[in-house]
Image: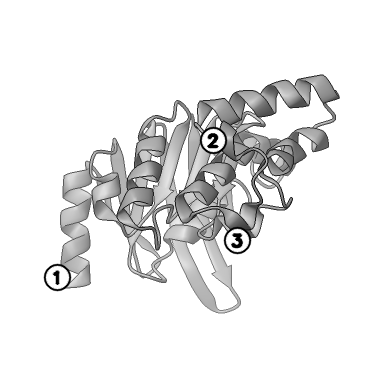
Amino acid sequence: MDIRFSGASVRYGERTVLQPLTLSLTERRIGIIGLNGSGKTTFARLINGLVKPTTGTVTVNGLDTVEDASATLAEAGFIFQNPQHQIIMPIVHEDIAFGLKNCGLKADEIERRTAAVLERFGIAHLAKRRVHELSGGETQLVAIASVLVTGPGILILDEPTNQLDLKNRRLVENTIAGLGEHTIVISHDLPLIERFDRVILFHDGRLVADGPASESIRAYHAVAGC
């Protein structure tokens, strides 16, 4: 993974949401933390082009997120805070296969890759289940499978343990820990990211800490006043 921000900022009208940033991301597991409205989700969405920089550039493995938008989306998958919003089809198997159909693959290859990703995440038993019947943790796993089945090397997750009970939180946490893909996690769930390789803290649209998890979490407590 080679993600580079070069003077990248985001402004909406007169309001600057993210101050100019110049940095690179190469670590396998990166956490992004900060208070609500701090700029952390905007930062993450710049990576796969969901948000375009007002100034500067963002590149992912050499691809410009503006000039090479489609290719960037193939490099970096995104799981929204509410994964139900990105599950399109009513049945689990259909939803996972949906992205592969858009890639123009043949039916037998779609079936092979769908079965493989269901098995990978231990959700083969959910293949015929209606998505509205899934638990929160199961929904998160289906969303992850639906994104990773197309083969991105980077996965970005926005608050993946939000509103999950202890059992489902542990399910999602263990799944994230076992991912081979480079993983970037936005989270208020500090125990989730305390063993990550690098943690970045945003506050009022500025990057204020960037380093080992323990140091960035300590800085977070300071800016949060707790």
Q: In which quarter of the image is residue 195?
A: top left
Q: How far apart are marks 2 and 1 (CA)?
A: 39 Å
Few, some or many residues within 10 Å of mark 2 (<14, 14–19, 20+): some
Front position among marks 3 and 1: 1
Q: Residues within 10 Å of mark 3 (few under 14, many from 20)?
A: some
Gap in angstroms between the C-alphas marked 3 and 2: 41 Å
What residue sits 38% from the left and 42% below the top? 171
Dot 3 or dot 2, earlier in sequence? 3
Residue 54 — which label? Answer: 3
Q: Is residue 174 visible?
A: yes
SS for tag 1?
loop
Tell me the residue at 73%/36% (across/down): 97
Q: With respect to residue 111, does 89 lie above or below?
A: below
Going by the numbered disc 3, the residue's amino acid type is Thr
Which amino acid, by three-letter code, is at mark 1?
Answer: Cys
Q: Nearer the viewer, residue 108 or 125?
A: 125
* Nearer to me, 34 or 52: 34
Locate residue 86, reporting x and y percent.
65, 54
Marks 2 and 1: which is nearer the front? 2
Colouring rule applied to residues: one colour
Residue 67 lies, in percent from the top left, at: 72, 43
Judged from the image, the secondary structure of the residue bearing numbered disc 3 is: loop
Helix, strand or loop at mark 2: loop
In the picture of the structure, the residue carrying the numbered disc 2 is 123
Q: Quadrant of residue 149?
A: top right
Dot 3 or dot 1: first in sequence order is 3
Which residue is pictured at 75% across the width and 33% down the height? Answer: 100
Q: Residue 226 carries which label?
A: 1
